[in-house]
Image (tube, rainbow, N blue to C red):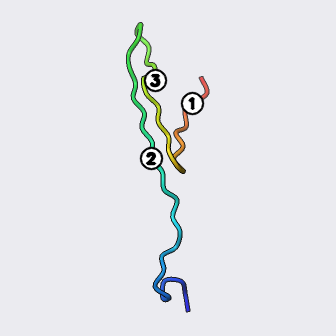
Amino acid sequence: MTIAAAGTRPQRAEGRGHLAAKLFDGRTRIRELYQEGAAKIRLPDT
């Protein structure tokens, strides 16, 4: 018998993320960064 056949659902990761940007002196800057749970916002290393 598989897990699905037993009537249970497999575990799933949950998370939420939010990123807001603004323009400052002609360059883009992060205005707001929010991460919760398993959400991971990755940014380039510049």
Place residue 44 in its image quadrant: top right
Q: Which residue is mark 2?
A: 16
Quadrant of residue 19 within the rendered picture: top left
In the rendered view, tell whether residue 7 sits above or below residue 20: below
> Marks 3 and 1, how far apart in space?
13 Å
Asked if the residue under mark 1 is in contact with the one under mark 2, i.e. CB atoms within 8 Å, the reply is no
Residue in the image at 45% along x and 19% along y: 29
Residue on which disc 3 sits: 30
Does label 2 or label 1 sit earlier along the sequence? 2
In contact (CB < 8 Å): disc 3 and disc 2: no
Q: Residue at x 59, y 22 (%)?
A: 46
In what element is the residue under mark 1? loop
Residue 11: percent from the left, percent from the top? Answer: 53, 68
Q: Secondary structure at mark 3?
A: strand
Amino acid under label 2? Arg
Q: Nearer the N terminus, badge 3 or badge 2?
A: 2
Residue 3, given in percent of the width and then of the height, sits at 54, 83
Percent across and percent down for residue 24 are: 41, 11
Label 2 vs label 1, nearer the camera: 2
Question: Residue shown at 50%/88% (left/top)?
Answer: 6
Q: Amino acid at mark 3?
A: Ile
Alpha-carbon span between mark 3 and mark 2: 17 Å
The residue that disc 1 covers is 44
On screen, residue 40 above or below 9: above
- Looking at the image, residue 32 sits to the left or right of residue 40; the answer is left
Q: Nearer the viewer, residue 42 or 18?
A: 18
Q: What amino acid is found at the position of numbered circle 1 in the picture?
A: Pro
* Residue 43 x %, y %: 55, 32
